[in-house]
Image: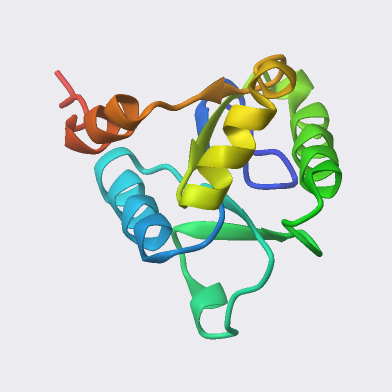
Amino acid sequence: MDFLANDVLSGELSPILLGYSANAGNLSRRLFHRHRLISHVFCERVSFLRRLSLTMKFHFVCSFSHDELLLTALEDFADANRASEVILYLIPTTTATSAFVARHRERLETRFVIASADDIRRLCEISPLSSQ
């Protein structure tokens, strides 16, 4: 597998977290420690110290109150990674981003696999396969 310029591995699952919250931080750490996945976090702003995380790569969007801006950012990210055949796994981490996904599910499903609450729970509980 080859690294792409934006740290997404070809053919891999790539978690896309919508919104930054304590839940997003915890989820990204669990995904990294259990599955060695770096999460891409789309959010409005994050303090400088939180940006130093090794488990998250931040993508800033000016305003989450304008759905079209966030949709465009997500679609541009998906289009940039289309050639790598990466599975973009969209995970809303706040009530507001869950509502956003519900409003635009049909449009988002053309580029992303959208996680349900059960999917998120299972993803965090499954341990990585041991090498045989």
The residue nearer to you, when weighing 106 against 87, is 106
The residue nearer to you, when weighing 5 against 113, is 113
Residue 61 lies in what quarter of the image? bottom right
Is residue 17 visible to the viewer in this orientation of the structure?
no
The residue nearer to you, when weighing 49 against 20, is 20
x 64%, y 22%: residue: 105
In which quadrant is the N terminus drawn? top right
Residue 10 lies in what quarter of the image? top right
Here the colouring is rainbow
In the image, residue 2 sits, relative to residue 32, either above or below, namely above
Point out residue 103 in the picture as x, y percentages from the top left corner: 66, 30
Is residue 96 visible to the viewer in this orientation of the structure?
yes
Point out residue 6 in the picture as x, y percentages from the top left corner: 71, 47
The residue nearer to you, when weighing 50 against 128, is 50
In which quadrant is the C terminus drawn? top left
Point out residue 11 in the picture as x, y percentages from the top left corner: 57, 20
Q: In the picture provided, is 72 more to the left or to the right than 122?
A: right
x 62%, y 23%: residue: 112
